[in-house]
Image (cartoon, rainbow, N blue to C red):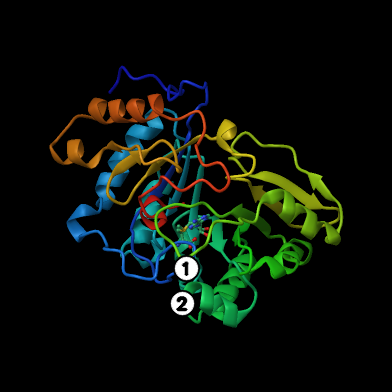
Amino acid sequence: MDTIAFNNLIDPCNRRLNYLRISITDRCNLRCAYCLPCEDVPRLAHEAVLRYEEILRIVRVGVRLGISKVRVTGGEPLVRKGVIGFLSELSRIPEIQDLSLTTNGVLLKDHLEALKSAGVSRINISLDTLNPERYRSITGIDAFHAVWEGIRAAQAMGFRPIKLNVVALNGINDDELVDLAGLSLEFPFHVRFIEFMPIGQSRIETRSPLLVPDIQKRIGVLGKLVPIERAEMDGPAHRYRFEGASGEIGFIPAISHQFCRRCNRLRLTASGQLRPCLLSDRQEDLKGPLRRGCSDADLAEVFFNATRHKPADHNLAVGEPAHVCCQMRSIGG
Ligand code: SAM
């Protein structure tokens, strides 16, 4: 491992991969319409899920290859036992400059103190509606107020930035885009509109997806959107601010503009697979070699393989059928 140089996860398109997203569980306490089908999808057996110490070993190899940004996601990361201890361990890895969490927020309020102590200050929370009834119909659970209280408590405790992820869906929440965008005028939140991606099975009809140009047009009634200059660690989101707003608006044009040119990500699934592209099922096995006792150099080789096989772009033109079989909750979004 000592012979491996820093910063050498450079893919064939010259993108430097410095961002690892880790799904720590495929379990979730919500059943969002865009993430799960009606019928039960089998969950991973306990043994099939990477243990925290296994993930930490993978991350320690990753940081030696230039990974400096890590997001913990799921499934729902806050339902996995021991998540706070795991996050503390991650935040003690000096090479990680940016550690963040994506959560549905249902259990957030009760975890805020512990998250802060564990060194996590950047949180993304999924919030697709401001209507409690609709929240229940999208997610299957009556938890809007719990999530909103978690968001406000996080704000009061100084978590920054607080990003609110909105999957924009025709016929489901398109009549709320302006209200959701308006949160960035009232609060310092970063409201991010994500185009629906046909990944795994879901309960969403994809024939008329709601795309970023349309979203921009609709929320334009709130004022002029001023572009924000990209920062070094930014991912594929296009960032804007309404004039005078304390918050931001972000667009993730996964389908309409593609976001591949800016993609700096690798994804570690709950079952220990390294995926170079969210929208492709290609993956490299880390768990097998790890459990057979491989060296750190062998694990690094898996990172290099994933990097070599990162596609230039995805093949999901609007309206084409999905080719991604793995469920989003295993990949982590
Ligand atoms: N449970 C956490 C949550 O709800 O934020 C983390 C996991 S969730 C899979 C991560 C993100 O993926 C969420 O912001 C969710 O809205 C988004 N997501 C899930 N399925 C999606 C889809 N089909 N298209 C676009 N975004 C999706």
State left or right for residue 284 relative to residue 123: left
Please name whichever residue, 212 or 238, is drawn nearer the observer in this view of the structure.
212
State left or right for residue 3 relative to residue 204: left
| Structural distance between the alpha carbons of marks 1 and 2 | 7 Å
Please name whichever residue, 183 or 278, is drawn nearer the observer in this view of the structure.
278
Q: Secondary structure at mark 1?
A: loop
Q: Residues within 10 Å of mark 1 (few under 14, many from 20)?
A: many
Q: Is residue 161 visible?
A: no
Q: Secondary structure at mark 2?
A: loop
Q: Which mark is residue 32?
A: 1
Is 234 above or below relative to 39?
above
Identity of the residue drawn at 75% across and 48% down: 240
* Residue 101, percent from left and from top: 48, 55
> Does the CB distance between marks 1 and 2 fall below 8 Å?
yes
Please name whichever residue, 78 or 251, is drawn nearer the observer in this view of the structure.
251
Is 124 above or below relative to 133?
above
Quarter occupied by residue 329: bottom left
| Mark nearer the N terminus (1 vs 2) | 1
Amino acid residing under circle 1: Cys
* Residue 36, percent from left and from top: 41, 64
Identity of the residue drawn at 30% across and 42% down: 273
Identity of the residue drawn at 39% across and 19% down: 5
Q: Residues within 10 Å of mark 2 (few under 14, many from 20)?
A: some
Please name whichever residue, 322 or 152, is drawn nearer the observer in this view of the structure.
322
* Residue 262, percent from left and from top: 59, 33
Amino acid residing under circle 2: Gly
* Beta carbon at label 2 within 8 Å of ligand 1: no
Tell me the quarter of the image containing the N terminus.
Answer: top left
Instruction: Name the residue tied to disc 2.
Output: 140
* Residue 333, percent from left and from top: 47, 51
